[in-house]
């Protein structure tokens, strides 16, 4: 990529953790002080720290700075609170090799001795009582206590922007309606964006070089516009912004929310209230504005798009402002491999004559700017797969993860013990292959892991941001034509439209929507959650040849699993789980049984031993519908977390929405599951069934 398609120093290596990563330890100390205040309510608001207007406390004469200082009433001595980052203070538990080089080029022992000397002076020379906590102690407590970890994460503490944690997110994947059965004048359309990521890389503008990093003390001064920001014109920056966002109470036009939010447990959601999303709250939102808002990073394009649709920026903390931008950064790269992919796809249907082929080549070059060599157009599935992989995977290479596992082989006891005692790595597993060879699985500790030199996280963040916005533009088109959204997944949309009505614009070129099964008519759709849906369809011209398809993540839909997990059983489970009226559907085969609201499936699976040898084993999984992307409403529709209408919130009612298309989902009936009726299950209990089929 760099050698063949880019000028020198055009894409720069961005530091893992951000340009201000050295301040992250200070941010953790501020989080701990607020946590301390929660544990000791009498200290709330009395502990001086870096967030105070006068700054953190200084010790006279020696110039020491304190993470926190609580000036208690006599006879109690002032309490100095010190949060010790293990890497920066040479923790003997985390770094037992004392001559190891750590922060500021000093050894672990030197850092620890300086820390101990400092603590001794604070206590014996300056009269402070000490409250000292080490970083690994807090991490251990949080690891073993889920409730404590939730309280810790809920503490609002501003830390330097990390583009991987704050700005880099995947695609939008969520159901908008869990079940829809078409009326006679309706049909369900499944459309997919042609090469979404290559399209945005080719068509959009990306930052070049290093940014100007602006912090809060600078951002609140002119020429910045005063807060809150309510329109894109208020934002004068181009790049990445760490901001606190206030979402609207509801989206105009029945549209889904724009901005993504990652919850405390790692779910990527699109809510209108952070607290509701964190708690998976199915009740109407009653939280205040502060609880509804959230602090995270966004690209300026995604933030401006949201400002146009009712969002507000109520506070700003850090900006990476880029002065140089290139609208053609990836154009030549994408054109090269999209051209190879197109040539390896062969001639499209309908290009039989020389005239048709000449028109196809001319039109493709006019629209895409790519010249196709007619002599090289030949169906080649292998070459097509490679070209498609190279066109789609470049942005991921720019955001490659650190701290991955690797396998190392030790040939002598000395090499093995060197790996075992290496303070920079964690040994996750090892296997004695022979008397002279050990296979070790290791991973770099986070503080010593280095990102690949190919990484450029801001550019990767812009790729995914542009992609989400491009999908959202098509979601808006569905709304404009009066369609009903059913589901979306990164680059695809499933929606309902009138059979003779308007459609979302479709095409064959990059960035355009293309019909997935144009010769079929989809009659019914069911979704159990993200990456978990199915549909039933017939021949569009005859209405015959009914088929059904399921797409469920992590479940191989082979013939054997299809006997248990198919469209009908999935529909049964979804209606059992999510139907607000409490009724279920019993129109399934007599030899399929449920326990609770799940079904056990077993299937052959290929695995690897610790020595990387392949083997086949019988895997068992339990399928259960699970949708944690929003509230489930009557009619099997969903609403984003936090959606509320001021006129109806007190009554807890759903706003009535006028739609040109209405669902004709039949009222389901109730099934009474009696375990005594299972074949050969006389006297069985639910536990017996789970042990046999769902373990």
Image: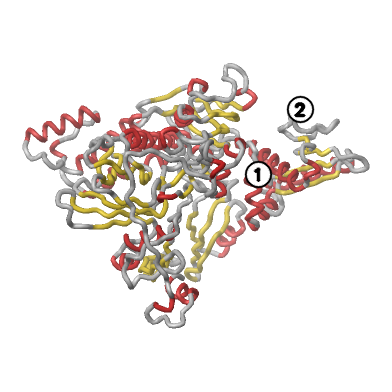
Residue 172 falls left or right of residue 542: right
Res 379 label: none
The secondary element bearing badge 1 is classed as loop
The part of the image, by quadrant, that contains residue 47 is top right
Position of residue 627 relative to residue 323, above or below, is below
Q: Going 24% across and 28% down the picture, which residue do you hit? A: 369
Residue 505 picture location, percent across and down: 26, 34
Tell me the crowding category of disc 2: few under 14, some 14 to 19, or many 20 or more residues within 10 angstroms, Cα based.
few
Q: Is residue 484 left or right of residue 13?
A: left
Q: Residue at x 70, y 53 (%)?
A: 137
Q: Nearer the viewer, residue 601 or 586?
A: 586
The image quadrant where one finds the N terminus is top left
Q: Position of residue 675 (x, y in %)?
A: 43, 76
Which residue is at the front of the view, 618 or 341? 618
Q: Is residue 466 above or below residue 592?
A: above
Left or right relative to 43: residue 316: left
* Front one among 487 and 39: 487
Neighbourhood count class around disc 1 (C-alpha, 10 Å): few under 14, some 14–19, many 20 upward: many
User: In terms of sequence position, does the residue under pointer 1 or pointer 2 come before the other?
Assistant: 2
- Judging by the rendered image, the residue that carries numbered circle 2 is 54
Does residue 524 sit above or below 361 in this rendering?
Answer: below
x, y percent for residue 162: 55, 38
Extreme-right residue of the structure: 75
Q: CA distance from mark 1 to mark 2?
A: 31 Å
Residue 452 shows in this picture: no
Tell whether 198 sits left or right of 107.
Answer: left
* The label number, if any, that marks residue 102 in the structure image: 1
Q: Which of the two marks, 1 or 2, is nearer to us in this view?
A: 2
**Kind of element beneath mark 2:** loop
Q: Is residue 672 above or below residue 351?
A: below
Q: Is residue 262 visible?
A: yes
- Which residue: 38% across, 36% down? 472
């Amino acid at each position: 990529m760099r050698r063949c398609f880019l000028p020198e120093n055009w894409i720069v290596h961005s530091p893992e953790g951000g340009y201000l990563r050295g301040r992250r330890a200070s941010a953790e100390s501020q989080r701990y002080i607020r946590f301390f205040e929660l544990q000791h309510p009498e200290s709330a608001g009395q502990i001086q720290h870096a967030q105070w207007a006068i700054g953190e406390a200084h010790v006279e004469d020696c110039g020491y700075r304190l993470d926190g200082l609580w000036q208690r009433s006599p006879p109690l001595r002032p309490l100095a609170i010190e949060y010790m980052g293990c890497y920066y203070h040479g923790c003997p538990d985390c770094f037992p090799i004392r001559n190891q080089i750590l922060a500021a080029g000093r050894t672990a022992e030197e850092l620890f001795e300086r820390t101990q000397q400092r603590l001794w002076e604070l206590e014996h020379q300056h009269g402070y009582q000490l409250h000292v906590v080490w970083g690994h102690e807090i991490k251990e407590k949080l690891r073993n206590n889920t409730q404590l970890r939730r309280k810790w994460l809920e503490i609002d503490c501003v830390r330097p922007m990390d583009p991987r944690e704050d700005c880099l997110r995947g695609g939008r994947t969520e159901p908008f309606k869990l079940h829809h059965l078409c009326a006679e004048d309706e049909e369900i359309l499944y459309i997919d964006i042609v090469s979404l990521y290559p399209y945005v890389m080719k068509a959009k503008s990306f930052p070049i070089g290093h940014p100007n990093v602006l912090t809060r003390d600078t951002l609140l001064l002119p020429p910045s516009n005063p807060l809150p920001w309510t329109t894109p014109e208020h934002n004068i920056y181009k790049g990445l912004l760490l901001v606190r966002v206030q979402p609207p109470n509801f989206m105009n036009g029945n549209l889904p929310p724009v901005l993504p939010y990652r919850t405390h447990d790692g779910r990527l959601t699109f809510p209108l209230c952070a607290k509701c999303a964190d708690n998976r709250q199915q009740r109407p939102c009653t939280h205040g504005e502060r609880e509804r808002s959230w602090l995270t990073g966004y690209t300026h394009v995604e933030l401006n798009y949201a400002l146009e649709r009712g969002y507000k920026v109520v506070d700003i903390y850090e900006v990476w402002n880029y002065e140089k931008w290139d609208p053609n950064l990836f154009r030549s790269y994408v054109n090269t491999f999209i051209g190879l992919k197109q040539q390896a796809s062969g001639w499209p249907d309908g290009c039989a004559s020389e005239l048709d082929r000449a028109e196809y080549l001319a039109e493709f070059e006019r629209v895409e700017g790519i010249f196709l060599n007619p002599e090289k157009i030949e169906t080649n599935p292998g070459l097509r797969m490679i070209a498609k992989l190279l066109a789609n995977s470049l942005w991921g290479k720019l955001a490659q993860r650190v701290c991955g596992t690797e396998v190392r082989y030790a040939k002598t006891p000395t090499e093995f013990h060197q790996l075992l005692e290496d303070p920079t790595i964690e040994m996750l597993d090892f296997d004695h292959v022979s008397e002279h060879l050990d296979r070790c699985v290791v991973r770099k500790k986070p503080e010593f892991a280095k990102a690949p030199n190919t990484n450029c996280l801001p550019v990767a963040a812009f790729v995914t941001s542009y992609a989400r916005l491009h999908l959202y533009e098509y979601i808006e088109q569905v709304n404009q034509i009066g369609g009903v959204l059913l589901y979306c997944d990164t680059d695809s949309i499933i929606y309902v439209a009138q059979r003779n009505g308007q459609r979302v614009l479709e095409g064959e070129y990059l960035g355009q929507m293309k019909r997935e099964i144009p010769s079929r008519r989809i009659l019914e759709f069911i979704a159990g959650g993200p990456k978990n849906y199915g549909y039933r369809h017939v021949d569009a011209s005859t209405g015959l040849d009914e088929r059904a398809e399921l797409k469920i993540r992590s479940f191989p839909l082979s013939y054997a699993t299809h006997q248990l997990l198919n469209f009908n059983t999935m529909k049964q489970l979804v209606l059992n789980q999510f139907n607000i009226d409490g009724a279920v559907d019993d129109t399934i085969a007599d030899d399929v049984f449920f326990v609770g609201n799940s079904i056990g499936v077993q299937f052959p699976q290929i695995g690897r031993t610790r020595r990387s040898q392949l083997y086949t084993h019988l895997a068992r999984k339990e399928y259960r519908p699970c949708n944690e992307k929003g509230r489930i409403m009557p009619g099997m529709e969903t609403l984003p977390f936090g959606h509320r209408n001021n006129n109806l919130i007190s009554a807890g009612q759903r706003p009535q929405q006028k739609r040109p298309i209405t669902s004709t989902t039949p009222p389901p009936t109730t099934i009474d599951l009696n375990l005594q009726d299972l074949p050969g299950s006389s006297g069985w209990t639910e536990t017996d069934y789970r042990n046999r089929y769902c373990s």
